[in-house]
């Protein structure tokens, strides 16, 4: 600064308002960024949906863990109310308890309603397992200590909010909630794998319900178990079935349709496992795979081309390595009057997504039923659970399904016939088996008097023992876990999906 006592003439004062304005803009942008990063309350969270549950991500999804008091979605109200009531009873009982968190991508988007209702069925099965574990009159001699609290966590749409949820679960494993394990996990997505990796790193054992991607289990680093047959077993069972058809019917032609979306670990592992099993067992495949890409626009256009190629190739069957939602695209394309060539489509467990959900208009669902019938496409899939499967795998006196059906009716109403129909898609069965298996490990860790220290490490130790003579009597069949956490050689059901929404059991499939 020039000394005003000198003789140097003073320069005109600079105009400061443009710089002041720029400073204000920069400051405002900084404040906006800070709020974006830290959240509206300065805590790093978005707006609070309920205690401990916050709006997260670009869609502002309510992500966190609920004891049932916050329902995440209206379709879950009745089940969450039951869970909340049972959790309150556990806390008021004065008995020792531990918590299991059932995590799922509870947020969906229009067009994926069937996924949402599948999640409701899973939670229903998980709740009924909680009731069986907590009530000695229902639990088949498994005791009642420690009691089980069932918490529910939202992974966000397509499991994209896995990070904040896993952080919350980890925190609760070290606090008063006494979280000892995690179940569920929903679809096999990239976020699912990241959640599994982080929970494994933190030493929290997991039990997958309907999640089937091959890469989640790890012999060298145990921690992830599942009650569902992994994709490699589903693909193996599918190859066995198709190879048998080629033996019975000379000239039986099999083609492959695959999704090239590498971000979806379900599609990629199902395709790779099928190719490996087909090569190893001599299944003859026609031509090159017919491909589409579900992660970009123009999927319907792609299926128009795929349908033309199928009708030109005239295979007896196609193996579909893709999501159920895209089976809907294929059926729609095959229903065009100039196609309608007869073919059997065989796929994995995600076939359930082919159906429109209950929130879709009846007119749209009726139109799809007509399209399906016109298409001449028969859909078979490797089902992870079906009411008929237990009767095929257990002696009548050892079948756990009848008692489960009675409990279902007592809690949610309906005739035995209606309940068995509700169980046909396997979702409730697998949700039950995931929590039931964890509960048995928890009881083993607690010891004969139920007073032993139960934590994630002790629960993991007991999960590693659930094999051989210690197999779990699951509703989906006996569960004996291998060293990698997968169920050893677990049988599956070959099920036909009807346009009417019926799941017809065809036969037992083995890997």
Image: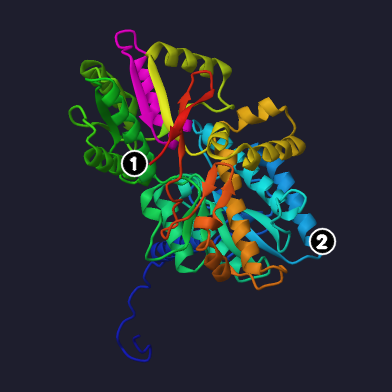
Seen in the picture, residue 366 relative to 169 is either above or below; the reply is: above
Mark closer to the chain start, 1 or 2: 2
Is residue 398 on the magenta stretch?
no
Residue marked by disc 1: 270
Residue 93 badge: 2
Q: Quarter of the image containing the N terminus?
A: bottom left
Residue 412 badge: none
Name the quadrant containing residue 412. top right
Residue 236 position in % (x across, y down)? 34, 40
Tell me whether the residue at label 1 lies in contact with that at label 2, contact meaning CB atoms closer than 8 angstroms. no
Disc 1 residue crowd, few under 14, some 14–19, many 20+, Cα 10 Å: many
Is residue 327 on the magenta stretch?
yes
Residue 444 position in % (x across, y down)? 62, 64
Q: Quarter of the image containing the C terminus?
A: top left
Q: Secondary structure at mark 2?
A: helix
Instruction: Name the side, left or right, on which 431 lies relative to 187.
Output: right
Instruction: Name the side, left or right, on which 188 lies relative to 304.
Output: right
The answer for how far apart the CA atoms under marks 1 and 2 are is 46 Å
Disc 2 residue crowd, few under 14, some 14–19, many 20+, Cα 10 Å: few
Return the residue found at the far top. Answer: 337
Q: Residue at x 24, y 23 (%)?
A: 253
Return the residue found at the far bottom. Answer: 5
- Whether residue 167 can be seen here: yes
Which one is nearer the viewer's eye here, 248 or 365? 248
For the rendered model, the colour scheme is rainbow
- Whether residue 321 can be seen here: no
Magenta segment range? 325-353
Residue 308 position in % (x across, y down)? 25, 18
Instruction: Name the side, left or right, on which 316 lies relative to 46.
Output: left
Q: Secondary structure at mark 1?
A: helix
Residue 111 position in % (x across, y down)? 49, 30
Q: Residue at x 21, y 30 (%)?
A: 284
């Amino acid at each position: 600064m020039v000394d005003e006592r000198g003789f140097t003439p003073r320069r005109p004062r600079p105009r400061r308002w443009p710089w002041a304005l720029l400073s204000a803009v920069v400051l405002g942008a900084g404040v906006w960024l800070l709020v974006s990063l830290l959240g509206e309350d300065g805590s790093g969270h978005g707006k609070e949906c309920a205690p401990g549950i916050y709006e997260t991500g670009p869609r502002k999804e309510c992500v966190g863990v609920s004891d049932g008091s916050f329902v995440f979605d209206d379709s879950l109200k009745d089940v969450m109310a039951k869970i909340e009531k049972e959790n309150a009873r556990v806390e008021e009982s004065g008995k020792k308890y531990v918590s299991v968190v059932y995590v799922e991508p509870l947020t969906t988007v229009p067009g994926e309603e069937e996924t949402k209702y599948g999640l409701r069925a899973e939670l229903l099965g998980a709740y009924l397992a909680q009731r069986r574990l907590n009530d000695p009159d229902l639990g088949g001699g498994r005791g009642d200590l420690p009691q089980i609290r069932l918490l529910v966590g939202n992974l966000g749409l397509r499991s994209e909010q896995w990070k904040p949820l896993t952080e919350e679960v980890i925190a609760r494993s070290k606090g008063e909630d006494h979280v000892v394990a995690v179940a569920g996990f929903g679809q096999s997505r990239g976020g699912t794998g990241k959640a599994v990796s982080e929970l494994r790193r933190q030493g929290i054992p997991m039990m997958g319900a309907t999640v089937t991607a091959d890469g989640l289990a790890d012999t060298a680093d145990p921690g992830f178990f599942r009650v569902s047959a992994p994709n490699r077993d589903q693909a193996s069972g599918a190859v066995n079935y198709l190879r048998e058809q080629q033996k019975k019917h000379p000239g039986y032609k099999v083609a492959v349709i695959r999704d090239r979306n590498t971000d979806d670990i379900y599609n990629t592992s199902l395709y790779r496992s099928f190719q490996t099993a087909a090569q190893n067992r001599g299944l003859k495949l026609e031509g090159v795979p017919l491909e589409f890409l579900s992660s970009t626009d123009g999927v319907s256009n792609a299926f128009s081309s795929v349908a033309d190629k199928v009708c030109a190739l005239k295979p007896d069957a196609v193996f579909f390595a893709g999501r159920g939602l895209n089976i809907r695209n294929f059926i729609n394309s095959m229903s065009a009057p100039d196609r309608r060539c007869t073919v059997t489509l065989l796929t994995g467990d995600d076939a359930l997504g082919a159906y429109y959900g209950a929130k879709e208009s009846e007119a749209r669902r009726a139109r799809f039923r007509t399209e399906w019938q016109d298409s001449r496409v028969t859909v078979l899939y490797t089902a992870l659970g079906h009411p008929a499967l237990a009767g095929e795998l257990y002696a009548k006196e050892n079948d756990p399904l009848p008692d489960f059906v009675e409990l279902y009716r007592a809690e949610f109403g309906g005739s035995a016939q209606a309940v068995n129909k509700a169980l046909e898609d396997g979702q409730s069965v697998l949700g039950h088996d995931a929590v039931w298996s964890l509960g048995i490990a928890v009881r083993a860790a607690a010891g004969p008097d139920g007073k032993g220290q139960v934590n994630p490490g002790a629960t993991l130790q007991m999960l590693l023992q659930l094999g051989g003579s210690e197999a779990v009597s699951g509703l989906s069949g006996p569960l004996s876990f291998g060293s990698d956490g997968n169920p050893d050689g677990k049988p599956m059901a070959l099920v036909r999906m009807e346009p009417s929404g019926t799941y017809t059991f065809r036969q037992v499939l083995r890997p």
